[in-house]
Image (tube, grey):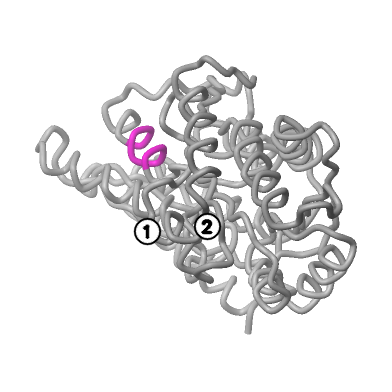
Amino acid sequence: MKYLGAFFLAVALLAGCKNTEKGKSSESGVSIAVFIPGVLAGSAIYEMLADGTKKAAEEFAATGQNAPAPTVTVIEGGFNQAEWESQITTLAASRIYHLIVTSNPSMPVIISSISQKFPNQKFLLLDGELKGNPNVYTLRYNQREQAYMAGYIAALVSLENNKGGAKTIGLLAAQEYPAMNDIILPGYLEGARAVDPAFSVDFRVVGNWFDAVKAAELAAGMIRSGAIVLLPIAGGAGQGAVQEAYEAGAKVVWFDTNGYAIRPGTIIGSAILRQDKAAYEKTMLYLKGELPFGKAEVAGTADGFVDFVEDDPLYISTVSRKIREKQTQLIACLRTGELKLD
């Protein structure tokens, strides 16, 4: 049924090309596709991607600058990464969409290949980097800052709750990829060692983004080895790590979105990305004809795209004032540029 569904998607997309010039009807206005590399349900980071794009289209339509209104279509690609390239190729081949918006660190390679086959297709890629392609704009978040904030509070909480114990924090990844190995893992360790140079990171890999049972097993191993604060970056699998931490009395730092409500009292920090803000602002620039295609930008805490959630009541009630004050000082230094992490 999965392949049959893909077939009908392709047919539907190609059918939309009829009676249009290169598949783009002047009667329907600007058409935008948001490709979700996964599913929307339960994935706040991709919900923000879709919501930010839709908000830009709605607000631009309200100005009446380019009637008729832009349209936004959201396509879920599913969890099989091997299928993403063929799915986006189908979208580009349909020639329906003026702009394809997506987000994932694996997308630069995929988009680079597709843009060679369809040199007129425009792409807006968040959370990735591809320089010099005249039809692609990318915005990469400064995840060194994001990981540093996570490592900093993880170390603070670990010291407070594990006095005399191992100076180890955990990082559980769904997969190994360049941003994980070269930016997030080193940044996480760097943040912890800013608290105490003796800290180390217990790094383990699930192998996929959905196996919560395996994630729970790996988390249990980390906790037994002395890591009482964990950072799961594992999609749906991360829920297994959270449950294991809760049952073992350990703590969790959440990544990309506000996670305090996932397990109140267990989640002690949320280092987030403002993907809704990025999707909104960059889509609006595109609709105004001002998006600088060919450019690859990096944005961080000082730009408002990377942040740490400090005002959530669950954070305030769970984390001691002493730790919160230290975390606030760190975030202020990043926001003002006093602390610069390239």
Q: Residues within 10 Å of mark 2 (few under 14, many from 20)?
A: many
Q: Is residue 77 magenta?
A: no
Question: Which amino acid type is shown beneath numbered disc 1?
Answer: Pro
- The residue wearing badge 1 is 313
Quadrant for residue 86, please give it: bottom right
Q: Provide residue 96's location: percent of width, then percent of height.
A: 41, 49
Q: Secondary structure at mark 2?
A: strand
Specify the label residue 181 is tagged with.
none
For this orientation, the residue located farthest to the front is: 164
Report the number of discs.
2
Specify the label residue 36 is tagged with.
2
Q: Is residue 128 above or below residue 10?
A: above
Residue occupying image coordinates x 53% and y 67%? 265
Residue occupying image coordinates x 54% and y 45%? 271
* Residue sitting nearer the eye, 250 or 337: 250
- Marks 2 and 1, how far apart at CA: 31 Å
Residue 123 shows up from this direction:
no
